[in-house]
Amino acid sequence: MRTLQIVRFTTHDEYTAFAETEIRRVCHAVTAAAPEGLQYLAVRSGREFLLMLNLAYPAANPLLGIETAAHFRRALPNWTSDGAAPQPFTVIGNYNMLAPAQETSK
């Protein structure tokens, strides 16, 4: 079974729109960098956000090398009071929602 890293947080009212804008910036930066073996999904419902990260190579997280993502991670505690720490989740069922993170031969 695969494990996903999920960050779940609720923003303070005044930071909800800002957090969404910053997450869009992260997604654009990830798309521009096109790191191999990474899947990233961000969703929102009201003030609650879920950020999901699936890595083909868990020991090497390419998000750590993308400055926009690093900045987001450092700033996030200012927008929320619920910790926003990554938590591992095990995928127990999946029907075409999550494709496996692709590994390539080197």
Image (tube, rainbow, N blue to C red):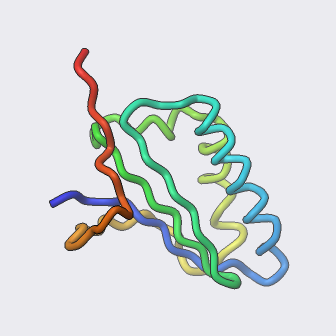
Q: Residue at x 34, y 45 (%)?
A: 55
Q: Residue at x 36, y 67 (%)?
A: 87
Q: Nearer the viewer, residue 39 or 77?
A: 39
Image location (x, y in percent) of residue 33: 58, 29
Image location (x, y in percent) of residue 25: 73, 47
Q: Residue at x 66, y 47 (%)?
A: 26
Q: Nearer the viewer, residue 64 or 48?
A: 48
Q: Is residue 63 above or below residue 19?
A: above
Task: Say which quarter of the image contains residue 103.
Answer: top left
Q: Residue at x 50, y 73 (%)?
A: 8
Lateral position of residue 56 relative to residue 44, left or right: left
Lateral position of residue 75 relative to residue 90, left or right: right
In the displayed image of the protein, which residue is found farthest to the top? 106
Q: Nearer the viewer, residue 11 or 49?
A: 49
In the displayed image of the protein, which residue is found farthest to the front? 96
Image location (x, y in percent) of residue 31: 60, 37
- For the N terminus, the image quarter is bottom left
Lateral position of residue 51 relative to residue 23, left or right: left
